[in-house]
Structures are given as C-alpha cells and as structure tokens.
Image (cartoon, rainbow, N blue to C red):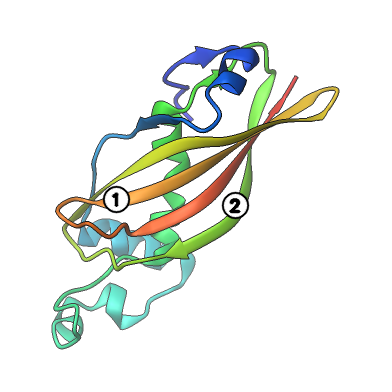
C-alpha cells in the first residue's frame, strides 16, 4: 500500500455512511497482466491464457480472471478511501459478498466506485468500515464486479 489518498476522523466517516466516497482512476487490463496472474495462481485456463483459442468463443478474445478483477479492489480503494486518523494500521478484512457480473475482455479499462455502507465499532481497539464496491468497465453499462468490502482499523 503506497498510502491512503486522505486521512479522515472516525466521526467524519460515520457522517458519510450511505454516501459515495470516491472513484478510482482507470486501470488497463492487458494480456500481459492476465497472463502474469494466471502464471502466479496456476489458473491457466485457455479463456484467459490463449488468445487464439479464445477468439472462437462468444467473447472473441481472452477475458480476465474474476479473481484478478477482485484483486484490484484494494489498490483502487487505497486511491480514494480515507485512512482513519489515529489508527495504528488497517487490515483488509475481506469481502461479505462478491459477484462477477460481466466479463472483463482483454484491453478493457476498469475503475471502482466506493460507497460507505457501514461504520462499526468492533471492540475497544478496532473499528470497521464496509464499502459497497462497483468495478465499472469503460464503455459498458453493466459492471464487471460488485462486492461488499471490509476494512478493519486497529487503534
């Protein structure tokens, strides 16, 4: 994590529950990225890794792994979701819900919108923010992914 875009007090974030926090910059998804992800994870299915075979599918090209799209969420979130002032460190606590709504065809551009859904005090030294995340595909109405992302802050 390079660092948060901004720092905000807990109280100011509680006031923003129900609001969009921000939208990340566009990211290109090229074949080199897809191939590197496939090599790293061992998911070498032809639909991701073989451009020639993938041409014969209804997609007409390779598509990104759904998990590749999901793996971009934290970095996109760090661009726009504020760090909680006074926290010792944040933890990517995971996801409650993830849906891969539409394919990410090679050459696509993606960005993510983050809306703050909940702000909860978990314990005396932990607080949790839950974001609704929508990963958009440039030029398409239907998103690539929707998810509920949890960030926990330790004080």
Percent across and percent down for residue 57 are 19, 86
Please name the residue that numbered disc 1 is placed on: 136
- Tell me the residue at 19%/78% (across/down): 59
Residue 107: image quadrant is bottom left
Please name the residue that numbered disc 2 is placed on: 95
The Cα–Cα distance between marks 2 and 1, rounded to whole angstroms, is 18 Å
Q: Earlier in the sequence, mark 2 or mark 1?
A: 2
Image-based side of 93 in relation to 51, left or right: right
Q: Which mark is residue 12?
A: none
On-image quarter of the C terminus: top right
Image-based side of 82 in relation to 129, left or right: left
- Tell me the residue at 57%/14% (across/down): 12
Percent across and percent down for residue 118 are 62, 35
Residue 127: image quadrant is top right
Give whichever of 62, 14 is nearer the camera. 14
Relative to 15, does residue 42 appear above or below in the rendering?
below
Percent across and percent down for residue 63 are 27, 70
Give whichever of 90, 119 is nearer the camera. 119
Q: Badge 1 local density, few (<14 within 10 Å), some, or many (20+)?
A: many
Residue 88: image quadrant is top right
Q: In the structure shown, which secondary structural element does the residue marked by tag 1 occupy?
A: strand
Give whichever of 133, 89 is nearer the camera. 133
Q: In the structure shown, which secondary structural element does the residue marked by tag 2 occupy?
A: strand
- Numbered-mark total: 2
- Tell me the residue at 49%/30% (across/down): 1
Percent across and percent down for residue 73 are 44, 45
């Amino acid at each position: 994590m390079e660092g948060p875009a901004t720092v905000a007090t807990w109280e100011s974030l509680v006031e923003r529950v129900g609001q969009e926090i921000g939208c990340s910059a566009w990211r290109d998804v090229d074949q080199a990225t897809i191939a590197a992800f496939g090599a790293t994870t061992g998911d070498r299915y032809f639909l991701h890794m073989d451009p020639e075979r993938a041409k014969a599918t209804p997609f007409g090209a390779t598509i990104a792994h759904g998990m590749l799209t999901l793996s971009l969420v934290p970095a996109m979130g760090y661009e726009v979701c504020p760090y909680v002032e006074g926290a010792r460190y944040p933890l990517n606590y995971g996801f409650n819900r993830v849906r891969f709504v539409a394919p990410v065809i090679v050459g696509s551009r993606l960005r993510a919108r983050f809306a703050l859904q909940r702000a909860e005090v978990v314990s005396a030294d932990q607080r949790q923010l839950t974001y609704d995340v929508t990963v958009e595909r440039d030029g398409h109405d239907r998103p690539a992914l929707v998810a509920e992302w949890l960030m926990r802050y330790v004080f």
